[in-house]
């Protein structure tokens, strides 16, 4: 049983911003260098997945195996290109309704945290100008176990000082929904109900929550 929401924990890619398109450009470029094509359909498998696991999936698609050393170098190359793309981002790339919803709940005393697998999350929040909208940022630099392990969300709840049963997670990946449920938190899926089957409820985007309230006021 989930209590009243005292804290909201947001995934980054797919909930606050669509960085998947930049991950895709960088992975595609790496695949090309390695001599194979990487499609947008293949890229779907990388959403919410850690950088190293993403590389392993990419190599599986290309039918390649690399030494651990070569894998570390390839992941670093991909990340250099990815960072080039994200440093050009600005506030116009925040997904519809996301900043408004964050301001809306914060104004009502709800604590907010980021719970993302990305090691680049702090850079992205800075580029979007929304770092001050989060009371805690838990990213891939702070956790060792990937979703569906609940570590990222439990750490966020701990940093906020709010019990898990009073936290609600907003997530676009199935593994993230699983992680939220394992943490004993409410789970709001952002995306398609047929994909996010285990979520307590599914919305198309955070903008949908704003239409439930008077969102005329500038927050
Ligand atoms: P990085 P999220 C995830 O972000 C992305 O969805 C996933 O595609 C990416 O591989 C992962 O972050 C790690 O990102 O290479 O920047 O550390 O959905 O957990 O916010
Ligand atoms: Mg995501």
Image (cartoon, rainbow, N blue to C red):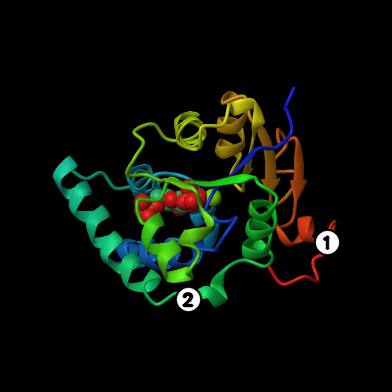
- Tell me: residue 35, above or below residue 152: below
Marking on residue 211: 1
Q: Position of residue 203 (x, y in %)?
A: 75, 51
Q: Name the residue under label 2.
A: 90
- Tell me: residue 98, above or below residue 64: below
The quarter of the picture where the C terminus appears is bottom right
Q: Any atom of ligand 1 within 8 Å of the CB at mark 2?
A: no
Marking on residue 178: none
Q: Would you say 194 lies left or right of 83 here?
A: right
Front residue (pair 19, 62): 19
Q: Would you say 131 lies left or right of 109 here?
A: left
Q: Residue 144: in sight, yes or no?
A: yes
- Mark closer to the chain start, 1 or 2: 2
Q: Where is residue 166 in the image (x, y as percent from the top left)?
A: 65, 31
The quarter of the picture where the N terminus appears is top right
Q: Would you say 185 lies left or right of 87 here?
A: right
Q: Would you say 111 lies left or right of 1 here?
A: left
Front residue (pair 31, 111): 111
The residue lying at 44 percent from left, 67 percent from top is 22
Q: Position of residue 30 (x, y in %)?
A: 31, 63
Q: Circle 2 sits in a helix, a strand or a loop, which is it? A: loop
């Amino acid at each position: 049983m989930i209590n009243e929401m005292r804290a909201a924990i947001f995934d980054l890619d797919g909930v606050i911003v669509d960085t998947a398109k930049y991950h895709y450009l960088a992975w595609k470029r790496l695949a090309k260098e390695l001599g194979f094509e990487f499609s947008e359909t293949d890229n779907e498998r990388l959403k919410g997945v850690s950088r190293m696991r993403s590389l392993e999936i990419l190599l599986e698609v290309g039918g390649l195996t690399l030494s651990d050393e070569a894998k570390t170098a390839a992941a670093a190359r991909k990340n250099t290109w990815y960072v080039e793309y994200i440093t050009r981002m600005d506030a116009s790339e925040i997904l519809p309704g996301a900043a408004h919803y964050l301001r809306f709940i914060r104004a009502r005393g709800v604590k907010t945290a980021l719970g993302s697998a990305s090691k680049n999350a702090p850079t992205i929040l800075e580029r979007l100008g929304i770092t001050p909208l989060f009371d805690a940022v838990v990213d891939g630099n702070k956790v060792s176990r990937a979703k569906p392990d609940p570590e990222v969300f439990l750490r966020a709840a701990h940093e906020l000082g709010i019990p898990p049963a009073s936290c609600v997670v907003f997530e676009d990946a199935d593994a993230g929904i699983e992680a939220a449920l394992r943490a004993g938190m409410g789970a709001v899926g952002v995306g398609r109900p047929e994909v996010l089957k285990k979520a307590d409820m599914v919305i198309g985007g955070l903008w949908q929550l704003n239409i439930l309230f008077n969102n005329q006021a500038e927050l």
